[in-house]
Image: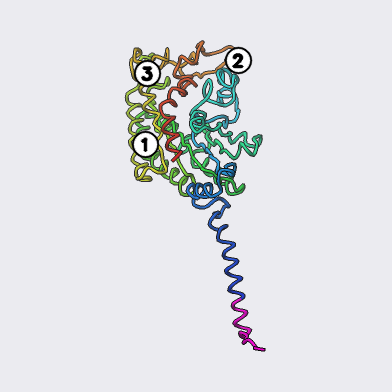
Amino acid sequence: MEHRRSRPPSVAAAGALLCLAMLLVGALLPAASAASADGCPAGGERASKQQGRSRGRHHRKHEVAEELWVFGDSYADTGNLGNLGRELTHAWYDPYGKTFPRRPAGRFSDGRVLTDFVASALGMRTPVAYKARRRASRETLARGMNFAVGGAGVLDTGNFQRNISAQIDLFQAMHHSQQRGCGKRTALVVVSGNDYAYAAADKDNGTSAAIAYIPTVVRELREQLRRLRDEAGMRRVVVTNLHPMGCTPTFTRLLNYTGCDPLANAGAAQHNTALRSILGALDPNNRTFLLLDVHTPFADILLNDDDNKSSSRFASTLRPCCESFRADGYCGEENENGTRQYTLCDDPGRYFYWDDVHPTQAAWAAVAGTFRVAVKSFLSV
């Protein structure tokens, strides 16, 4: 009977350990390649698409979900500004919300605002407001959240509201603690001019002071956009340019609603030029950032003659639907007897502006019609 020569114990043990190590590595590699440090699929969208193809049609329910995270001010706020009384927080009082949801609900309009229309362009429901998060379902929270709050700016605006940097801080704190965010994250950043209004009032030099503030605002905005991409892990970032601020009723009232303030509009154009420049530097290949052009459709409607076809849907473009009796009054104001100190139009759908600053739902719908296809196309790539 032939006796086989056995390996020395040390060699056998080493071989066993090597096999065990290879088995462990083989078991761990798929997990490492499929998940990042926070438990989300690694490789972003591309990895999720590859995994989806390999799993087949019967596993579509596991596809990565779309998420919309919103940062900004009252043009995007869907209920984050606390109710601090009629004078400070008009959006929680009549006649706000007259069209939708037919009661005051914290939106700065008679109805839906920009956030609602961007979400609709993505085929999503409007993300829940941060203030209402505790009442939201898990499914709702998985679609994203709106951190935008009325009065906020890129920098501090003196309104005691979280600026965009602080809003991003909230997102990062929630993501870190709750381990969410495994979907296709899109950020919507809405900047509507609060920084410049604050600069004009604070420095008591009017529009010229606001224009001088543009480099500071845009420089800080660049940093926050970078954070969203590099630190918050946003797959896409949609950022608005500035509407023609000189056409808001705050300015047009001084001209008896007959025209726009050219200097304020020049300042908005200067901001937009600087914004295009920083987006080009941040994203030369135009893969992450989309400039959401609200300036062009605003201008097409507000700066054209009344007989122009694009503006004919609105009976009034420079006068607001809800107009205060006094220049320093506000929509929704009442005196000590509860008597209205404002006039209200019969049909907000025929007015571009709802109050001294904010568009109507009909205006937002008209503006959204110009960018809906572009937004959907950019985010589907």
Disc with the residue nearer the chain's start (2 vs 1) = 1
- Nearest to N terminus: mark 3 or mark 2: 3
In percent of width and height, residue 377 lies at 43, 35
Q: Quadrant of the C terminus?
A: top left
Name which residue type carries label 3: Ser
Residue in the foreground of this view, choosing between 82 and 364:
364
> Mark 3 falls on what kind of element?
helix
Q: What crowding class fits label 3: few (fewer than 14 Cα within 10 Å), some (14-19), or many (20 or more)?
A: some
Badge 1, how many Cα within 10 Å: few under 14, some, many 20+?
many
Disc 1: which residue:
214
Estimate the x, y position of residue 217 in percent, counting from the top left.
40, 38
What SS does tag 2 mark? loop
Callout 1: SS: helix
Q: Which residue is mark 3?
A: 310
* Residue sitting nearer the eye, 26 or 227: 26
Q: Residue lying farthest front? A: 1
Picture layout, residue 10 above or below residue 135: below
Q: Residue 61 location, x and y as percent?
A: 59, 41
Q: In the picture shown, does residue 263 fall above or below 139? A: above
Mark 3 touching mark 2, by CB under 8 A? no
Colour scheme shown: rainbow
Can residue 7 be found in the magenta stretch?
yes
- Relative depth, front residue between 309 and 330: 309
Point out which mark residue 336 bears.
2
The residue range painted magenta reads 1-15
